[in-house]
Image (cartoon, rainbow, N blue to C red):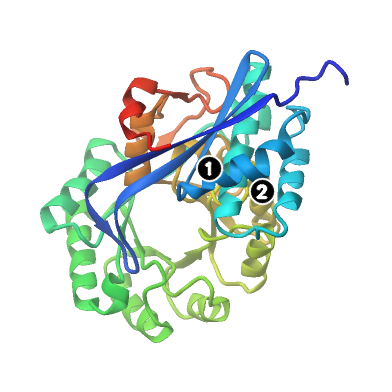
Amino acid sequence: MSDQPTVEAVDTAVYTVPTDAPEADGTLAWGKTTLVLVTIRSGPATGLGYTYAPTATAQIVRELLAGTVTALPAFDVPRANERMCRAVRNAGLPGVTAQAIAAVDIALWDLKARLLGLPLLRLLGAARDDVPVYGSGGFTTYDTEREDRQLRGWTEDQGIPRVKIKIGESWGSRQARDLERVARARAGIGDTAELYVDANGAYTGGQAVRIAGRLADEGVTWFEEPVSSDHLTTLADLRGRVPMDVTAGEYGYTLPYFAHMLAADAVDCLQADVTRCGGITVWLRAAALAHARGIDISGHCAPHAHAHVAAAVPNLRHLEWFHDHVRIERLLFDGALDPGGGSVVPGADGAPGLGLTLAEERARPYRVE
């Protein structure tokens, strides 16, 4: 239709925020986190999307994607997503390129909902009203006091009944400390809260099997990436040998990645990251693949980018309320959700789109590009 709104402009901005303490997991350490913001304008409306990725992601948006989506109908987000995927053929889709596409895709969905004056969840159609969350942090660099304070903050102060800590310290070479930290975490949160662990692929298959029994003694019910998610056969073998759920998928940048993981029977719950996998368009498809196999999906990190789409699928398990990203999203945006009681309710205030607006005054000191 000739009167349909079109994409008029695509802009980027990059913000880098230092962590509030040194952070590490089993295979990586970091002291700052970068958010790449994409804004897309059509008439009076501006949509926003973002990803947690290197600054170079913004260059990919400007050079490869902006021209691809400009002038397209603003309502035709799947069309735009497909065109972006085709445009980056020679650049390579997995990795930073997929994250760039994700940020643009999220911004396009936010724009469409804003043009229609709807919360994104109302546009997508709700499968549920609330989205369960789990507190995620417990970095291997934390001392006992800091970790306990963080976990109790979630379980006692906010009423979140499920939490996760990092294990696999130093590529799986400090298993005794891993187990000590798990035991302290269980003692701190009590017997009723669910306890999850994430090894970030630090262990070998043998290590993962051996440590799983000890984790089970502490009531751990979620073992995330016990080995690298690249090793689907090993993940599938572990899934049949350990008592808790085996989960992975956060490094899925394309839909076939999730199809291969599910076909390998490698996970009890599929994790997908809307800011990595190509955006809301592809996240919905990943959820459908999992649903067809009777598998739940969990949103990985970036909670405010996930909340609306997470409530739109029937096989959602929960959403990761990740310490770093919660802190950054509350700092850079107005409209943050409240996880009190263990869930968030996207769209409850009626704000259009994702319900977020850039807090320009707070964000300005962190802008690097």
Q: Which one is closest to the eye, mark 1 or mark 2? A: 1
Q: Quadrant of the C terminus?
A: top left
Residue 342's x, y, as percent? Answer: 37, 39
In this picture, residue 366 sits left or right of residue 243: left
* Residue holding disc 1: 58
In this picture, residue 104 sits left or right of residue 29: right
| Residue 335 in view | yes
- Residue 250's place in the image compared with 27, above or below, is above
Which quadrant would residue 165 be assigned to in this image? bottom left
Q: Residue furthest left?
A: 145
Q: Amino acid at mark 1?
A: Ala
| In front of the other: 192 or 273 | 273
Residue 286's x, y, as percent? Answer: 65, 53
Q: Quadrant of the N terminus?
A: top right
- Please rate how many residues cluster around mark 1, counting C-alpha atoms within 10 Å: few if below 14, some from 14 to 19, many from 20: many
Q: Amino acid at mark 2?
A: Val
Label 1 to label 2, Cα distance in Å?
20 Å
Residue 10's x, y, as percent? Answer: 62, 30
| In front of the other: 308 or 10 | 10
* Residue holding disc 2: 282
Which quadrant would residue 215 be assigned to in this image? bottom left
Residue under the point 45% across and 50% down? 54
